[in-house]
Image (cartoon, rainbow, N blue to C red):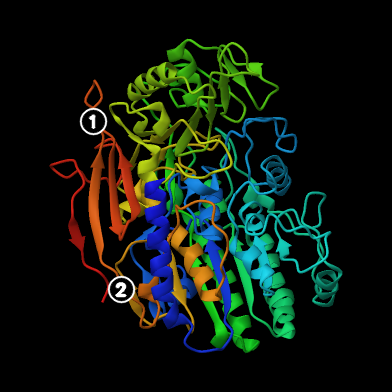
Amino acid sequence: MRRSLVLLSAGLTVLTTGFAAAQNNNTPRNLILFIPDGLRALKVTPETAPAMAAVRDKGVNFKNSHSLFPTFTMANGSAMSTGHYLGDTGVFSNTIWTNYTSVPAGDTVVPFIENDAVLGDIDEHFKGDYLNEETILKMARDKGLSTAAIGKVGPTYQFDHTDKPEKPGLHSVVFDDSTGAKNGVALSDEVKAALTKAGLPLATPPRGDNSKAGDAKTPGTTVANVAQQAYFADVATKVVLPMFKARNKPFVLVFWSRDPDGSQHNTGDSLNQIKPGINGPTSMAGIKNADDNLAQIRKALDELGLAATTNIMVQADHGFSTISKESKTSPSAKLSYDDTPKDFLPMGFLAIDLAKALDLPLFDPNDKNAKIEGNKHPKAGNGVLGKDPEKPDLVVATNGGSDLIYLPNKDKKLAAKTIKALLEQDYVSGLFVEDSLGRFPGTLPLSSINLRGKSATPTPSIVVNFRSYASDCGEAPTNCSVQVADTVLRQGQGMHGSFSRGDTMNFMAAIGPDFKTAYVSEIPVSNADVGMTAAQLLGLRGAQNGGLVGRVMSEALPNGIVPKAYAGTQKSKPAEGGLVTVLNFQRVGSQRYFDAAGFPGRTLGLEVDKLGMETGKQKTAGK
């Protein structure tokens, strides 16, 4: 509790001091949050992404950026939308354990939450607001601003998931993959009329070939998500922005571009091969697609006369890595599967290996709790372990570059056995354990990475980070990041979620009347800071249940305070075999920014100081 209060105090202090610079004039400001999903910071150049490079080079370049771990979309979307860390929002990954059966998710206790109907279901179960924190769109809507969220299904709706279009009052305009379908957010008559006038359909077009992930013998997509995102960009520029201008009041627009994430995940350029991985032509086409959308939005702002009063913040939810399916220690990799190349890790390898090590029956929560035996693996990788699948001893929520483990009975002996089993696998690189279970050699507590807070959803018992390294792809190490991933996708395709610097280093930049020009910031920033800064720019104030908050990025504002930043390292006690979980972090005031973590030699970007303890090396702050 004391740590939470200290963090809250620090966040509010910077909030107050950084605000004056942005609000010295009385001109109402608009805000656009543009999220190029999965965009790696160092892939942006004037050649690959001219629109994003222009925002970075002419506005503010947040050079020391951070995605929150676990580095997944819904998790970081929750941080951007609320300004809180994941320990408060409870969105620990894209797939979580909810401790009840979600019907819209396919009758499972481990729902994949990039789905509007699933989010509504989870809301209903957790007292109407699973995030347990107010979002910036809700606060803006309550204040009378025009609000809209457009783009990828899941994180888009999360920005105003408690809005009820069927009730009287102001509502956010929401467009995502589900618009026009049964589970889509309803459109108002005003919006439908504007769509018709603009010659646009009332339903979002599908992704087409971009959605094709392929399989072990068939390459995935070789095209970007052009048609669907062209529709979203047209909705933003031909319907929403003109409508907001006509209302003549401030607005907030969130545009969540599925690319380059979708094209990097499903890339067909590198089937079962590490290279080119996510550096092939399909991934580059995805980056260009997102950049084209941003360019179209900025052009519309100019044509509508809104550019001078609109701030634009561009931030990716996470970085990206090429998938590896290789392990020399995993029992699951020694079995043969119909859909997995020989000696490769199957989907659900963590659940399979733990079931064997703990001598517990394994059931598939995505297949009516069917028992997994022989040469089978869970359909979605998730697993419930124990004699009774309805009352499991252990639950694995599979996500990608990291997985979540839940111990429903809080069994400390089982926790110790599980940790011992995990330490024996070469694909593991760093373990984080729920504080109430105690301290275990080789692990760090969840509180050390802000995963223990006021969340409404269940807190994981153990978070497992997977091994990462850099291939010899000929670019910066973060662009060449490779990670072991628990996913249906194949070696050579793309994933994220790990504590690799390749995943934590996201693209971040900003431009507009309330930001400095041609400014390079060396100070650490995170996606939680995005939420706090957005709220500050708009003059929003909301109730806070938790204290794990970001800070206002005052150094990016004209005449704003430029705080000092420090770098440090935290290190666990060594496990029996000598493995140590090491955490590299930076600090601004009482707030930590997490660079990389894991076992030395198994995480890209992880540096180990000689003392293996918190240090006080000061980083040079931007001037």
Density class for disc 2 (Cα within 10 Å; few <14, some 14-19, many ≥20) is some
Residue 454 % position (x, y): 51, 45
Q: Is residue 412 above or below residue 141?
A: above
Indicate which disc, 1 or 2, sits on the residue closer to the N terminus.
2
Q: Which mark is residue 418?
A: none
Question: Residue under circle 1?
Answer: 573
Q: Is residue 366 left or right of residue 284?
A: right
Residue 392 % position (x, y): 58, 19
Residue 72 visible in the picture: no
Q: Is residue 218 above or below residue 191?
A: above
Residue beneath the point at 30% across and 61% down: 589
Question: Can you say which quadrant of the picture contains the N terminus?
Answer: top left
Query: Judging from the image, what secondary structure is the residue with disc 2 in?
Result: loop
Residue beneath the point at 23% across and 28% down: 574
Circle 1/circle 2 CB separation < 8 Å: no
Q: CA distance from mark 1 to mark 2?
A: 36 Å
Residue 423 visible in the picture: yes
Question: Residue under circle 2?
Answer: 562
Of residues 151 and 188, the one drawn nearer to the viewer in this rendering: 188
Question: Amino acid under label 1?
Answer: Lys
Residue 284 % position (x, y): 48, 59
The answer to which quarter of the image holds residue 29 is bottom right
Density class for disc 1 (Cα within 10 Å; few <14, some 14-19, many ≥20) is some
Question: Can you say which quadrant of the picture contains the C terminus?
Answer: bottom left
Query: Judging from the image, what secondary structure is the residue with disc 1 in?
Result: loop
Residue beneath the point at 76% across and 69% down: 170
Q: Is residue 598 above or below residue 50?
A: above
Question: Amino acid under label 2?
Answer: Val
Q: Residue furthest left?
A: 610
Residue beneath the point at 56% across and 41% down: 219
Residue 336 % position (x, y): 51, 18
